[in-house]
Image (cartoon, rainbow, N blue to C red):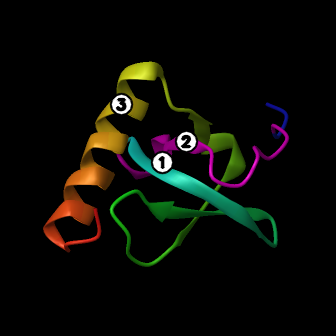
Amino acid sequence: MPIPPPPVPGTLVVDTGRDDQVGEFRGLAGPYWALRPVRGGPEWEAEPRDVRPADPMERLRAEIARRNARSAEGLL
């Protein structure tokens, strides 16, 4: 299976190698893709072949989670 081209930084993707965790693409980390949790936290490295674009419902859930986290921190 060929390695897909990296998405634009900030794109929401799903890491199927990590129980379908949604993350924000941050950039390249050697042969891996650096992803960051939507609510914040440390980045992790994912195998590009294990990453797929987030579908519309996954993006909506992630955006709601991001806004809820920011609201709880008083950032909205």
Q: Is residue 30 above or below residue 25?
A: below
Q: Earlier in the sequence, mark 2 or mark 3?
A: 2
Pointer 2 and pointer 1: residues touching (CB < 8 Å)? no
- Residue 49: where, in percent of width, then height? 69, 42
Q: Is residue 16 magenta?
A: yes
Q: Quadrant of the N terminus?
A: top right
Magenta range is 4-19
**10 Å crowding of disc 3: few (<14), some (14-19), many (20+):** few
Q: Residue at x 54, y 43 (%)?
A: 12
Q: CA distance from mark 2 to mark 3?
A: 12 Å
Q: Residue at x 48, y 23 (%)?
A: 55
Q: Amino acid at mark 2?
A: Val
Residue identified by numbered label 2:
13
Residue farthest along the top direction in this orientation: 56
Camera-nearest residue between 6 and 73: 73
Camera-nearest residue between 72 and 62: 72
